[in-house]
Amino acid sequence: MGGCPLILPRWSDPDGPTSSAWARPLPGCLHPRTYSPASSESSRILAPPTRPVRLSYKLLDGDAVRPALVLLHGLFGSKTNLNSVAKTLAQQTGRRVLTVDARNHGDSFYSPDMSYEAMSQDLQDFLPQLGLVPCVLIGHSMGGKTAMLLALQRAELVERLIVEDISPVDSKFGLEYLTYIAAMRAVDIPDKVPHSHARKLADEQLSHVVQDIAVRQFLLTNLVEADGRFVWRPNLDALAQHMEKLVAFPPRQESYPGPTLFLFGENSHFIHSSHHPEIRRLFPQAQVQTIPNAGHWIHASHLQDFVAAIRDFLV
């Protein structure tokens, strides 16, 4: 890439949430630029660590009487990874379904802060503005930890909680994720090559570090073209700097009293029986269900089982 790092800057606007139709900051390389939506002349700056950021989202219409379903993706993910499950849930439940990009992911804006407290605060500001509280909060992995923290902090905003394949405990996967980031940063793609060729080149280079083809394909969903150059959507700097926090869980004393469902993959390495006491302490109404033959991405590999479990829980 002629010395240009594969990182796409995002610039934040504290004015409130925006739809994904125009929440796309200008791509940049060595000289990041401010982003002005529509024809506004007011410049945007990188969000201060303590301020919520603008979140890109997609809302599927449905029954406005019953609580909406809000889906939160995991680390390196985006709302587009949840398209299939969102559409299926909307069709089978008749409810509104919201998918949203976390800060420093997808089409949402960049911030130097990547803590769970910050991601929870983004949603505390964002969901009421859309009129979607109280809601059914459904989070996978990193999104599951964000969902748990939000429920613990602001129980009145969460009608019920669904957590996919993660626990409110520290994880051991931080070093592995840092190797992914290093491998993504090292990818070198010539300018103005076809996207299919760029993806193939990136896959070949990532394969030296990331042997699992499914993980590589997942990471490659973040490779996008901007101004003739290929860039990574996530803010890799912020993710790397906060990885210790992202694989942990903020210590909490209060519990969430609402209905809670933990969905675990039978073959997942993210869950251990030793986690159950902490789950019961923080979420005393929790139900725990294991999906046979599923791994970490239950919603992708076992979509119908995932949706069926959610539907049963909502009854």
Image: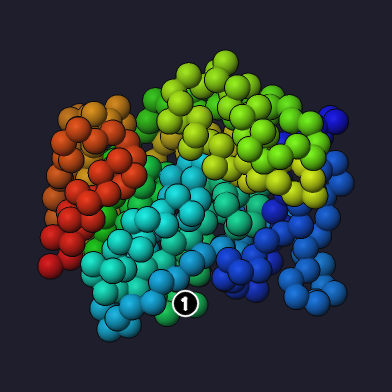
Residue 144 visible from this viewpoint: no
Instruction: Name the kind of residue labelled 1 in the image.
Output: Leu
Across and down, in percent, residue 142 comes to: 42, 44
Question: Which residue is depicted at the point 75% across and 37% down?
Answer: 193
Residue 139 visible from this viewpoint: yes
Location of the C terminus (image quadrant): bottom left
Q: Which residue is mark 1?
A: 130
Across and down, in percent, residue 200 comes to: 61, 29
Across and down, in percent, residue 70 comes to: 37, 64
Toward the bottom, the furthest residue is 65
Q: Is residue 272 above or below residue 35?
A: above
**Count of numbered circles on the image:** 1
Question: Residue 169 sits in which quadrant?
Answer: top left
Question: Which residue is depicted at the point 48% across and 54% down?
Answer: 80
Location of the N terminus (image quadrant): top right
Q: Secondary structure at mark 1?
A: loop
Question: Which residue is depicted at the point 23% across and 70% down?
Answer: 93
Question: Which residue is depicted at the point 63% across and 38% down?
Answer: 196
Residue in front for this viewpoint, 243 or 72 = 72
Q: Is residue 205 left or right of residue 87?
A: right
Question: Residue 269 sits in which quadrant?
Answer: top left
Residue in front for this viewpoint, 268 or 274 = 268
Residue in front for this viewpoint, 216 or 257 = 216
Across and down, in percent, residue 152 comes to: 32, 57
The crowd level at tag 1 (other Cα within 10 Å; few <14, some 14-19, many 20+) is few
Check the image and tell me how it is coloured: rainbow
Q: Is residue 123 above or below residue 306?
A: below
